[in-house]
Each structure stands twice: as C-alpha cells, then as structure tokens.
Amino acid sequence: MNTIHPSTRREFLKTSGAIAATAAFPHIVSAAPNSETLRIGLIGCGGRGTGAAVQALNADSNAVITALGDVFEAQVEKSLAILRKQHPERVKVAPEKCFVGFDAYQKVIANSDVVLCATPPGFRPQHLKAAIEAGRHAFVEITLGVDAPGVRTALAAAELARKKNLGILSGFCWRYNHHARAALEQIRRGAIGDVRSIYATYYRGDLTSKYHGEREPGMTDVQWMIRNWHNYTWLSGDVIILLSGGHSVDKMSWWMNDVMPLKAVATGSRVYPAEGNTFDNAFVVYEYANGIRGFLGCRGQARCHDDNSDYITCAKGVCTVNARGAVIQGDTNWRFTGPVTSMHQNEHDEFFASIRAGKPINDGTRMAHTTLMAIMGRMAAYTGQEITWEQALNSQEKLVPDFLDWNTKIEMPPLAVPGRTKFI
C-alpha cells in the first residue's frame, strides 16, 4: 500500500524541505493532437456530476458523453437534458446507454474511456477501483470514501493507476486555483518565512437547499437516505467535516507540503435537530511532527457568520487565501492580481491535456490521504479522544454495506456522543 506515515521532527524537516524544492503544482501540459475521440461516462447524475461533465466537454474538443448512470432514472433524464442543451452535438448517449440501478456504474465504465465519479462519497472507492481495474481514467469528486476501509481501497487503486499509467483527477479543486497556487509559490520561495500554524475555516449556512421534500409513501429507507445522503455518515461521512471541511483539510495538507499530521483532537456536535447521524459543527486540531498545529473550523448552521478562508501564519507574515483572492501581509506584502478563472474548469483542462500528452495526472494517493485526514478529524470529534494517523488508517469501522439494494436494512450508528462513542 502506498501511504505516507507521519514523520519524526528531523524526518519532517528533511522531507518538507525536499518537497518544497520540487514543482509545487500538478503537471501543466499542452494537449497533444486529439485525433482520438475520448468517451466520457458519468456515474452520479446530480448537479455536481452534471457540472463536471460539462467541464470535461469544455476541456477537450474531441471528447463526447457516451454513457450516464444513476440509481434514480429521473436524475439521468434531468442530467441528459442539461448536457444536450450545453453541448448538443457532443452528447452521444443512446437510450440503451442510460443506466439505472446499483450496477449502473459497471455499465458506464464499460462504455467509457474517462469516468466521472460523482455519487455520494460512500460509493466512490468501489467505483474508482472498478474504473482503474477496467483501464479507465477517472475524475473523483470529494471525498474519496467515508471510512478507513474505503481509503485503503482507494490507495490500492491509486497505486494500480500509477502502474497502468492511468489518470485520477481529484475533486479537491483548490489545488487548481491560480491565486492559491501563486500564494503557495510565494510561501515556498520564503517570502514570509516558515509556516508556523494554519487556521482553515469552512463556516457555511445550513443544508436545507439539499433537502428533497417529504418522504413519499412506499419509499424504502435506502431510497430516502440516498435522496438525502448528506444526513447519513455511511453516505457522506459527515458532510460538514468531510466534504466542507475536506476542502479546507486538503489545502492545509498542501500548505504543509503533503506531510501528514501525527494526530488530532476535536470538539463537535449537532446543535439543530435533523434526521440522520451527522454533526453540524466541529473544530479539529491537527498536530504535526515538528510541533506545528493546523486548526480546522467547520459549521453548517443558518444565520451564523460565514467564512471559507485559510489563514497561514508564517515566521514573517500572514497569508490569507479564499475565493476572493490571496493576500500576504508581513515582511513581504503581496496580492494576487492575475485573472480570475474557474478552478473547476482548470482541473479538467489540465487533466485532459495530461491524458493527451500520455502523462496523466494521478491525484489518487494525496486525495486518499486528505480524505483520511478528514476522517481522523471526524473520529476525534465523534469520540472525544485523541486519534493518531495510524489509528485512523488501520480503523476497522466499516460504514458502507457490502451488498445494497432498495430493501437493504442499514445498521446506522446513532448520533455520536463525545466521550461515549467508541473508536473502532
């Protein structure tokens, strides 16, 4: 298994220095002549999946959509209509290539060259594994799983992709944001000295926009849960800590040169009652081998202060990065003044260019590590205990059932109570 273990202080300094000396960003290449048409298949036809499909088509003029899959037929039809409106001449999805059901992902993979995995996170390790084993490139939305067994599956898939020269593009899209890249380059050049601490926020409103209405008569538990997947840990992993906070944790890992923390402690709870078993707030403290600490604050509550920023405190100044831009204040004062572009589009542009060049981007390992880092934070918040990297990686807690159909009975853990909920 290809994984990074936390380092001693001496190893941390040696490793982080070596990484800082290398290129900061994924391969940025120009596309080779695109004489071969790339077939794109979409697994998970919600808003994010459909958006990713549009961006994939925008990225490569000789790519076409050939297959769609979802567990709900209405989602397939809705996505297909949007895609045909956006790119009517390049959506070549015959009726028999619209797949519905829990095995739809297998059929999409069989009819694609590049697979877009955009289902709820609980399904993604299985879908990525199948795509790579079938020799397909894959885009995977965040996060790459909801538990340690899923992360271990994803790590094995990333290693297999490396051996097969297949690409894996991560939905942790901030690493493809131009002003975030520029800020990181300033820090790595030593503009404000070494990183001392990181405070990453994802304070957002509540998730009522994701609510799909009242439960219809005859709807099974599994149907209802997948409709409202953000409320359930087996599907989302905890949308506030893993998905919202996952973006922030991925940037934190980026600022720390992808050296993983030793351990985490956290607080968290659900303040506003809701169906399911996820928290609506958490605060996680990650400790690294060199004594640096990273702080993650995340919340999904209405009528509260919103903020989605990174505050990187260095020896000689502070760097702030958010959607509005990037600013450094200190011994060196700097502000990003370049053009504003879509990081969601940037990542697909670079991914398809890398495939055409025969050097596909493989974000799989670092995406799995970031996912595990977020899971470690959830484990610490749910149990109230200090959780180490090794504990998180080797955890035997398995949230996703091995077999699933519409009538599967889900053994859903109750809402966690810190100090009472046990680490598994």
Image: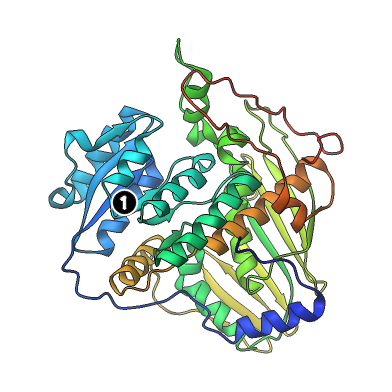
Q: Residue at x 70, y 53 (%)?
A: 393
Q: Is residue 251 toward the left or the right of residue 345 in the image?
A: right
Q: How is the image coloured?
A: rainbow
Q: Secondary structure at mark 1?
A: helix
Kind of residue indicated by mark 1: Ala
Percent coordinates x, y for residue 91 in the rendering: 18, 47
Return the residue nearer the eye: 156 or 413.
156
Q: Residue at x 50, y 79 (%)?
A: 336
Q: Is residue 311 toward the left or the right of residue 80 in the image?
A: right
Q: Residue furthest left?
A: 89
Percent coordinates x, y for residue 364 in the rendering: 51, 61
Q: Residue furthest top?
A: 217
- Residue 67: image quadrant is top left
Q: Is residue 407 visible?
A: yes
- Residue 195: image quadrant is bottom right
Tell me if residue 93 comes above or below residue 292 in the rendering.
above
Question: On the image, numbered disc 1 is attached to which residue?
Answer: 53
Mark 1 nearby-residue class (10 Å; few <14, some 14–19, many ≥20)? many
Percent coordinates x, y for residue 264 in the rendering: 78, 56
Return the residue nearer the eye: 231 or 399.
399
Q: Is residue 172 visible?
A: no
